[in-house]
Amino acid sequence: MALRITTTLAFTASIVAGAAFAQQPQLPPGEGRDIVAIACTQCHTFQFPTTLREGPAGWRFHVQDMVIRGAQVNAAEVEILVNYLASNFAPGVNLPPAVPVNLPEGAGKPLVEQSCISCHDLQKIGNERLGRKDWDRVMAHMIELGAPVSPEDAKVILGYLQEKFPAK
C-alpha cells in the first residue's frame, strides 16, 4: 500500500513538474543562450530576460551589475551574453504575449501604454510603488537606456506614475 502511494505521488509530481517546465518561456537559439540558461537562472527564472527589452547599453549595465553581485560569468562571456540579450531581447524584438493590465485612468496613461511597452510589459509598472525621487530616478535611467520619450512626455509620464503608483 505504501509503495503504491509513493509511486502515485512520484508520478503526479513528475507530471506537475513537467507541466511547469513546459510553461517556462523558451530562450531563442544563439551564442550566449547557454550562458543565460546556466548563469542567469541561478537567481532568476527564464522569464527575467524575456520580460525586459534593452539595447546593448542596458543589457551591459544589467550584466555588469549581476557580475558585481556574484553572477558566475567570466570576462570573455560578458560580451557574448550582452550580444545575445541585445539581439534577442531588444525593444520590439521577440515580445512575449502581453498580460492584460488595466492601468488606472489619468493624463499620462496613453503615454505609459505607448512608451513603456516597447521595453517591458505593463505588469512591471503596475506592480511598482515608488516615491517621487525613485520615479524620477527610474525615468532618468529609462531615458539614459534609450526610452523613446520626449522631455515633455517624460514630465507627463512622471506625473502619472507618481500619482497612480506612489510608495506604500
Image (tube, helix red, strand yellow):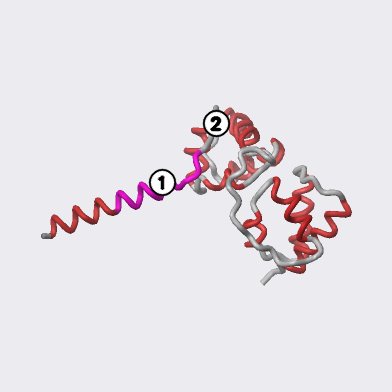
Total numbered labels: 2
Dominant secondary-structure state across the stretch colored magenta: helix
| Residue 111 x/y as whole percent | 78, 55
Q: Position of residue 147 (x, y in %)?
A: 77, 46
In the rendered view, does 129 fall on the left or right side of 137?
Answer: left
Residue placed under numbered mark 2 in the picture:
32
Q: Position of residue 105 (x, y in %)?
A: 74, 67
Q: Which residues are magenta?
A: 13-26
Q: Residue at left 69%, top 63%?
A: 103
Residue appearing at x 58%, y 43% in the figure: 49
Was residue 43 drawn as part of the magenta stretch in this picture?
no
Q: Amino acid at mark 1?
A: Phe
- Toward the viewer: 119 or 34? 119
| Label 2 SS | loop
Q: Residue furthest right?
A: 152
Residue 21 - label: 1
**Alpha carbon distance from label 1 to label 2:** 21 Å
The image shows residue 138, relative to residue 65, as above or below, that is: below
Out of 114 and 163, give the one closest to the viewer: 114
Marks 1, 2: nearer the viewer: 1
Which three-letter amino acid code belongs to the residue tagged 2?
A: Gly
Q: Position of residue 59 (x, y in %)?
A: 66, 40
Quarter of the figure that contains the N terminus: bottom left
| Residue lying farthest to the left in this orientation | 1
Q: Are marks 1 and 2 in contact (CB under 8 Å)?
A: no
The image quadrant that residue 124 belongs to is bottom right
| Residue at 52% from the left image edge and 48% from the top image edge | 44
